[in-house]
Image (tube, coloured by chain):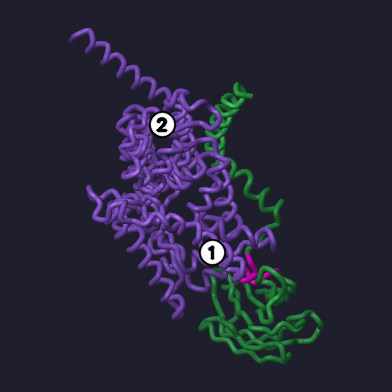
Chain colours: A purple, B green
Amino acid sequence: MTTSGRTEARSSGMAVWKAVLLMLPAALLSSLTWLGNLMGGDIDPLIVVALVASWLGFTVLFVLMLTTGKTYRYRSIMFILTAIALPLDFIPYMVETYGSMMLADDVMFSGGASFCPLTMPMIIIPALVKGVVIFPGEILPGTAKGAFSIMFILWVGASLAVGRGWCSWGCFYGGWDELFSRIRKKPLIKHKQIDSRWRYLPFAVLLAIVLLSAITFSPIYCEWLCPFKAVTEFQAPSSVLAVMQITIFALLFIGLVVVLPLLTKRRIQCGLFCPFGAMQSFLNKINIFEVRIDLEKCTQCKKCIRECPTFSLDESSLESGKPLMTCTKCAQCVDTCPQGAISYHIKGTPLKANPTVAKVLFLYPAYILLMFLGAGSVAAALYRILMLVTTGSMLH
Amino acid sequence: MEKIRPVLGYIMAVFSCLISAAILPAIAMLSEPFITATGLTISPNYSGGEVVQTIDHGAYETHVHRMVFDDVLIGERKEGFIQVDWTPLDALPARIDEEIDADGDGQADFRIEVDTTTKEAMLTPYASWVLELEGAYRPKDFFLVRVHLKNPAR
């Protein structure tokens, strides 16, 4: 081996060790969480296998993220797995608890619907004015999968920790959109063919659902517009209105989450429709992390604009050195910039400060969030699959 | 100031890591205190509102909820509902026939007859503001009816 070969091998070995050391706290934290899960009662060997497998998988992906510089690729795998895992566990849970994934009025009146963070924008005004939560779920954890208190604390914590980064690191639905946006190699509808004014739609949807929910005292988005009802729970088709709602959920899922992402290679639901994402754009102001473009290094090749999956970069970004407020910190532009001009940045620090430090400091809270939400879902789904293989049923 | 800002930035970045790691413990530890402190409840539109009268029948109980007209942001609706439920489900007789005082004035305002096995129910209004039966439901551990009312105060 030549001297330069030895130096190269030594430095790559150092990088791996550095990554392993960096990964250790996160791995310890996640193993503590799952050990806590196992302490709950009788230990089913299938649960142990599912937890260990998901723990190992997520830890390896985090190490790869730290060592290879391909943050987007490995985040994307975890993010997509999380989204696919959610219904694999949630739908069997619904069948076990209520007999189907449809919620009858009986279940609604007993608080059986599960909260998700997407309800938050609609809940705020009635909660502030009247002290009530306009959702047929539970305030504190009980029978349903997600109670209001869980989702509220999760939402506040995630907003502080990663801001709009929630949409690429925490959201347990966004992976569906991302999955379909990554299937084709080239888009059939190019980004230039999409009118940039569509980017305002999520803010219009946000305003509309906040006002309409406050007026009608019901969660309008959950009742009429959420595409992810198609893969979780929805109201039983007991009336013409309910049938209309279910049809809209299915059409929105097919249109916004499957077909348009396939055609455009963009996360259409996340970038052009989701009102929760729009709200997170405002809350991102309280978060310390951002993505910045070094204008001295930038050659204006515009690859980042073409590649951004959430329409968060445009010509103005290349002038200001900042992506638009809708940036979900997914790392696609960071990884693809041929000049290495785009990096994570900590607000208040000099732009030329060490980007690796900023990246690691961002990846830590982002990964912990993804690990808490995603690895739990993946373990639960894996457990259901193992049950199916060993007993022939996904149900308890 | 120029030296303090980067230091604050890095402190906040580390703080973000700690917040992220603290989310799960915070959910376990802060859920109840948070709800107690804010006094938040599920909208009466779904929960039926607070129970104002409990009638003990020995094996089972009747819960009469308050009349709900306030499931709007400001003021009250012209029409609303009252929820009456019976619990526990497995102790209920096949047939319940009960007179209910909805407004708490000591006078029965309607009579409700329900078949707890078939979910069939019949309403006999006594007061003019009792309009019709909205529905009879059987969630996991109780049986409930909702009666459509006109707001007597409007």
Give the quarter of the figure containing the C terminus of chain A: bottom left
The image quadrant of residue A321 is: top left
Chain of the residue that carries numbered disc 2 in the rendered image: A
x, y (%) of residue A161?
A: 53, 39
Residue B141 appears in the figure: yes
Q: Which residues are magenta?
A: B43-50
Give the quarter of the figure containing the N terminus of chain A: top left
Give the number of the mark in front: 1 or 2. Answer: 2
Residue A180 appears in the figure: no
Residue corresponding to mark 2: A295
Question: Within 10 Å of the Cα at label 2, are there few (<14), some (14-19), or many (20+) other Cα atoms?
Answer: some
Residue B99 as seen in the image, left or right of residue B8: right
For the residue labelled by badge 1, is the local secondary structure a helix, a strand or a loop? helix
| Residue at x-position 46% and y-position 35% | A30
| Residue at x-position 43% and y-position 69% | A102
| Residue at x-position 66% and y-position 71% | B72
Estimate the spatial distance between the alpha carbons at disc 1 and disc 2, rounded to whole Å: 38 Å
